[in-house]
Amino acid sequence: MDFKKYTFKNLPKGPSKIVNLAIIGTGAVGKALLNQLSGLNRASAEVGYNVVLIAPSSSSPGVQERSIVTKNFAPINLQSWNVSEDVGTNSHHLTRAITSTGDVAEFLERSKRPVILVDTTGALDNQEPGAENELVLAQSYPLLADQGISIVSANKTPFALESGLWNSIFRRPTRGTAKRGLVQFSATVGSGLPVTGILQDMMQTGDTVRSIQGVLTSPLSYIFNQYSQPGFASGDGSAKNETPRPTFSQVVREAVATGYVPNDPRLILSGLQAAQQFTILTRTVGLKVENSHSFAVRNLTPKPLREAETVADLLEKLPKYDSVLEKLRTKAEKENKVIRYVGTAKLGVDNSSLEVGIESFDVNHPFARLKNDEICLSVTSDRYTEPIVIKGPGSNPEASASRILSDIFKLSQKL
Amino acid sequence: MDFKKYTFKNLPKGPSKIVNLAIIGTGAVGKALLNQLSGLNRASAEVGYNVVLIAPSSSSPGVQERSIVTKNFAPINLQSWNVSEDVGTNSHHLTRAITSTGDVAEFLERSKRPVILVDTTGALDNQEPGAENELVLAQSYPLLADQGISIVSANKTPFALESGLWNSIFRRPTRGTAKRGLVQFSATVGSGLPVTGILQDMMQTGDTVRSIQGVLTSPLSYIFNQYSQPGFASGDGSAKNETPRPTFSQVVREAVATGYVPNDPRLILSGLQAAQQFTILTRTVGLKVENSHSFAVRNLTPKPLREAETVADLLEKLPKYDSVLEKLRTKAEKENKVIRYVGTAKLGVDNSSLEVGIESFDVNHPFARLKNDEICLSVTSDRYTEPIVIKGPGSNPEASASRILSDIFKLSQKL
């Protein structure tokens, strides 16, 4: 049979609205986003996008990379933005060291067109914990929004810090002020999966979310999928049991070596990233979470290794503590289960609970069947008493960039 | 720990825009939608909605039910719209027999506010095949859109008929005419799951969908989940094999009796509903599908039973043909697989394929692990080389209504 491609004819001729974009972050996600933006079919779009600023990640404080900005908000040539010669010959492009978000705000405020600041930093979660510039950027979100700048972010930090910051980011505009910028953050959790979108749809339509459970930190998904696999039930004397099993520290070391876990795995092993993800998800459905440390989070780094350790030190000493996880794995397998690192939120009428840690799941549970670094979310609500389950690839810069692009489209409708 | 609920403070005070809604269909989905609309917090919404017309399903041609319309587009009281006394005492409400979509269009065209026609007919798939009024409604979509009326639909028919109708629904406005109505149809497939939304996001952001596979017809999901269950692998002599297995006709009969399959299962067993679903999904990603009969669709009704049979006759004679499916089940189980009724679309650069029928899946495949009438979709694309998989409850009027509401919100941004 012969199936041809439709050409969609209902699209207007050329954009009726142009939105200026300022991209912060030129890591894998930032680069994928710029690539996707340059590939959009502008002729058929309702909204056109001009990229007017590209700044390297604010989380590299030591590096003196220069940003590209344009004169008079002319669009940056996305085919050649990172070729320095082009910047020299294209009279619309300027290079400038953008050293503060104040610089960015000052530049964007002069735009006559609607403006979206796109923060792709932190999207790949490979930053050092506590990078100072990142904190400054995160804390400037409320002010940027007050100044009418809308924000699309893939950066967990601004949304996972103190609840006061969350409240300020989403605060109501004060009377008499100009229109406040809007904020979208669906790329902060779930890589390219529409995880927050599913929750926001439920909230907007008046549903009440009752439980959220998920394996959302892709490096931890990889570690546990390798470490505890279905089919190793103890005591049945099957051949499988004779396969030598890797220890936890071996799995971690191998995951760092193959790139499934960042070179510095401390942020991952501490559970902080998972805690940030669940802070954001549960805040999205209306739970009041003070910060990412205000609930129980299982730290996979043994206490004696937590402070003043280099990564090499940590990986070297980790085998001493393998027995802790070995016990959990063996106990689960006796019940034909596997262990997984999950977040679990229950939202009750009178009380709610949130925790992030190790739980065991039947070998037929979707979390038990994850492969590589796949992530998976399960949600129930008043309307979905049987859960919606979504799973997909973990770390995926292309997909994260698409999620950012969807957010940009969504915001642009309202600008 | 104590988690309180957030009150979201960033919401504007009262709607700045009002959209008039005309609801066609007062079945389970229509009623759930009206209920959800009346529960929306209007004070905190950006857009307010006035329901100005409620018409019973157009697919009940014999029934002389009267519709409710309002004088001067005053909102219908959603708490008491179906209480006839209220209609009598509320001077804004009129009852009128709406006998054609022309009547509806004529009424809506006088609205000074943006208008959305919401078609909830066919959403529960319990209509008789070929109901004439439904065809008329389906075929009037292009004209309604031309007249500036936007449409949100849960009705598969308009989107699964000839490709000419699809093209007309989404045609570009001709020069010099007023703004054309917009059309959203995400509730046509996947009950309450954001199935078309995932595909549309991919398309809009410039990704290319490569494969779509899914168990999307919830009655067929139920039938096959009951009929072919993991754990019945032949030849291992386990106790499970001694459990008496139901035949296909027994499962169908039981599914009709318990309500998982409509009283008239002919539309389901013919595969037509599944074919419609895959026509819509694949058209959404740009495949040119002539109609729901232009590709291979497995009909579960044996040929001799297809014509001029009553439902009772069909169910009575079905056991004669049980051996056909029994062979498929046994063959699959020998390979530790189960059989499922799925649609499969592959989109290639040079050629594409689409078919709907019975396939076997490893007992660990997500389709093999479905419960009750759960539905499940798996999608790959250039960016998602590993699939996104989403599953959730099948027939769920509350969730379908939420999906319609999401579409209404989405359209309203643009009106």
Image (spheres, coloured by chain):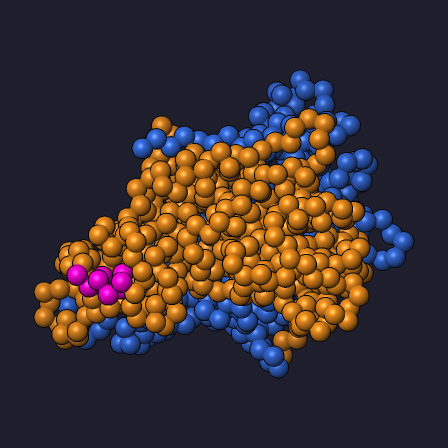
Chain colours: A orange, B blue
Which of the two residues, B233 or A402, is positioned nearer the viewer here? A402
Residue A370: image location, x then y, percent: 34, 63
Q: Is residue B359 visible?
A: yes
Q: Is residue A102 located in the magenta-colored stretch of the structure?
A: no
Q: Main secondary structure of the magenta part?
A: helix
Which quadrant of the figure has residue A3? bottom right
Q: What residue is shown at x 69% (from left), y 40% (from top)?
A: A148
Residue A408 is left or right of residue B147, and the answer is left
Which of the two residues, B41 or A150, is positioned nearer the viewer here? A150
Q: Is residue A319 located in the magenta-colored stretch of the structure?
A: yes
Residue B320: image location, x then y, percent: 36, 68
Q: What residue is shown at x 19% (from left), y 64% (from top)?
A: A319
Q: Where the C terminus of chain A falls, by quadrant?
A: top right
Which quadrant of the figure has residue A348? top left
Q: Give, as a single range, the part of the protein colored magenta.
A: A313-320
Q: Is residue B159 visible?
A: no
Residue B110: image location, x then y, percent: 82, 36
Residue A24 is left or right of residue A225, and the answer is right
